[in-house]
Amino acid sequence: MLRKTSIALVALVAGHVGWVSAQTSGTPLTPSPDQPASRVGTRGANFLEIGVGARAQGLAGAVTGLASGATAMYWNAAGIGTVGGLDAVFSRSDLYGDLGITHTYAGVVLPLFGGGLGVSYNRLDSGDIPRTDEFNPDGGDFAIGNVFDWTGTAVGLHYGRRLTDRLAVGFGSKVITEGMNGASANWWGVDIGTQFTTGLYGLTVGAALSNVGSSSRMEGALITRRVTADDAFGVDLPVRFSTRPLQLPTLFRFSIVQNLAGGTDGLFMANSSHRMQLAVQLSDAIDTDLETAIGLEYNYRNVLFLRGGKRWVNEANDSFRTGKNGLSFGGGLRLALLGRHVNFDYAHTSLNDLENIQVFTFGFGN
């Protein structure tokens, strides 16, 4: 809590200093070749761009062609088309060090209608944030509470199916809400995806288009206010703040996966005990720069998993291009239980000033 307050105070002081300077010697900001205009921060429900699952995060998010099971409903619904029975997952992420921001994902998939049918739940929670306003700049308004939290929630229904022995397709629809008590926005969105096994030296291609949907604006009690107008003889008049409509953060992912070793199509060797896969992915969101990710996964007898990856989080920011920023690692265990399997996975991602992301995932299924 103290850290959040400190960060907020720093931002407030910086903003105040910038405002004062702008009144005296500021210059207008215009796009230029080295600083082109961007759409960063112009979309709503940006929590939808935060990846889910420890396996995916350990591979730096390069899983569109690898996605399978219940987490595939987020990355690429085509990956649920081959489930052989109940597959369930619960994942929790602690974002950005000790700020108290959490990200939770849960999903269940069943083999139905010739493919896989699943339901997903995706939620971001800011934790407690001190509440202030123009009348209580230091907080302490007990009428509405001392703290509030900002949340984003998406509930989805997804279906995936294998059309041939090599081609799988999937799609999903979801209802999304973001905001706080008294001010929130609601959207609906759809996702589509495909995975294709080429049959050439263990090469698989995956692509997914996510978050295509409606626009929305903030609505609620905090968006309206009653003010006293002098020329209306002291009568209170309702006033509604002007809020801009926001669209969803539409995102396209394209991934190529190479089976380096293991199985019958390993590039270098066929081995039933060891398997290694390399994935490269390009992600292009409407509100971010083109991002690249690469991930490597090794598993021993489909029981022990080791993963590593690198994601170039922000191509326009040199501090994220090199070094450990965007570097991920993780691992997992897959154990037999009651005729099924349970999975325990962990991942860690380093993000410079944002510190790190830690993800814990528990799965039960095939």
Image: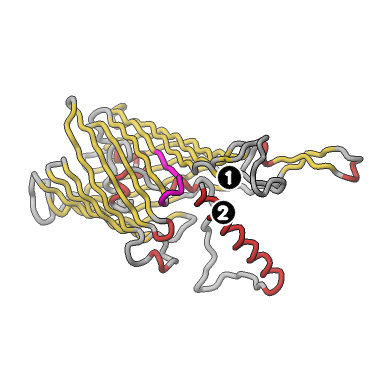
Q: Establish if 363 lies above or below 33.
A: above
Residue 130 on image: x %, y % = 58, 45
Q: Establish if 247 lies above or below 186.
A: below
Which residue does the numbered mark 2 point to in the structure image? 8
Which residue does the numbered mark 1 point to in the structure image? 130
Q: Quadrant of the C terminus?
A: top left
Asked if marks 1 and 2 touch (Cβ < 8 Å), the reply is: yes
Q: Nearer the viewer, residue 164 or 209?
A: 209
Q: Nearer the viewer, residue 11 or 217?
A: 11
Residue 71 on image: x %, y % = 33, 39
The span shown in magenta is: 97-104
Count the marks.
Answer: 2
- What residue type is disc 1 on? Pro
Residue positioned 64% across, 39% down in the render: 219
Instruction: Give SS at disc 2.
Output: helix
Q: Nearer the viewer, residue 121 or 141?
A: 141
Residue positioned 33% across, 66% down in the render: 323
- Mark before the other along the chain sequence, 1 or 2: 2
Report which quarter residue 340 is drawn in.
top left
Residue 63 placement, left or right of 190: left
Using the rendered image of the protein, determine whether residue 276 is visible from the camera's viewpoint.
yes
Q: CA distance from mark 1 to mark 2?
A: 9 Å
Residue 176 placement, left or right of 233: left
Using the rendered image of the protein, determine whether residue 255 is visible from the camera's viewpoint.
no
Residue positioned 44% across, 54% down in the render: 285
- What residue type is disc 2 on? Ala
Report which quarter residue 225 is drawn in.
top right
Instruction: Give SS at disc 1.
Output: strand
Residue 315 on image: x %, y % = 41, 64
Residue positioned 30% across, 32% down in the render: 88
Q: Residues within 10 Å of mark 2 (few under 14, many from 20)?
A: some
Furthest toward the top, the residue is: 338
